[in-house]
Image: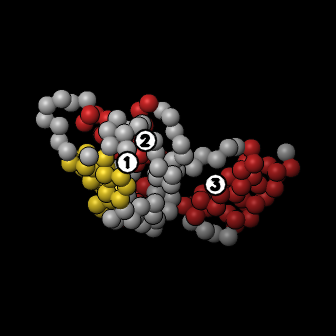
Amino acid sequence: MVLLCEFRIFVSVIYERSMDRRQFCKIGALALGALGAGSLKGMANVCVASNDDDTVLTRACRLTVMRRECYEDIQALYLDDPETGPCDTFATGDEWVLEKGECCPKGFCLRAWRSVAAAVNAQSSCVEGVRDVFIVACPDGTRPVVFRVEII
């Protein structure tokens, strides 16, 4: 109960400093997260070893980051921090050679990995007309990363 009272006092002090709503919500969320940080396990959006069947590759491939897009107009409308810029997890030209049966590489974005693994696994289920090179993008609508996938 003491923490909740302290949080309310903190929020009211911040709000009185006449900051815009977006900045207020961002600071309030950070403060609330700091209060509850000890009670939750880490919820990072970065892969660690995973054994889910849908995220294990069924074929070996070479994965290359082709582009990191950034749609600033959409970010300005929908993100709490409209100046986040392009994804900072990857750099253009990053490359991985992945073996059959491999899980998400350490430090790889989980949402991007699921897109890549689904595309690679779907390609392996086709018998005829399997393309050896194709493009996959992560599902981030405001700053997607575009990957070139080459089946090897």
Q: Is residue 29 left or right of residue 136?
A: right
Residue at 43% from the left image edge and 55% from the top image edge: 78
Rendered image: mark on residue 25: none
In the displayed structure, 131 sits above or below 46; it is above
Where does the image place residue 9, in percent across and percent down from the top left?
79, 58
Where does the image place residue 110, in percent across and percent down from the top left?
47, 46
Answer with mark 2 or mark 3, whichever residue precedes in sequence: 3
Q: Which residue is mark 1?
A: 98
Mark pair 1, 3: CA separation: 38 Å
Residue at 31% from the left image edge and 51% from the top image edge: 62
In depth, the one of 21 and 108 nearer the eye is 108
Which secondary structure, mark 2?
loop
Mark pair 2, 1: CA separation: 7 Å
Occupied quadrant, residue 116: top left
Residue at 25% from the left image edge and 29% from the top image edge: 125
Q: Residue furthest left?
A: 129
Asked whether disc 2 touches disc 1, contact meaning CB atoms under 8 Å apart, the reply is: yes
Mark pair 2, 3: CA separation: 36 Å
Which secondary structure, mark 1?
strand
Which of labels 1 and 3 is toward the front? 1
Occupied quadrant, residue 16: bottom right
Answer with mark 1 or mark 3, whichever residue precedes in sequence: 3
Q: Is residue 121 left or right of residue 134?
A: right
Circle 3: residue type = Ala
Q: Which residue is mark 3?
A: 29
Rendered image: mark on residue 102: 2
In the displayed structure, 99 sits above or below 76; it is above
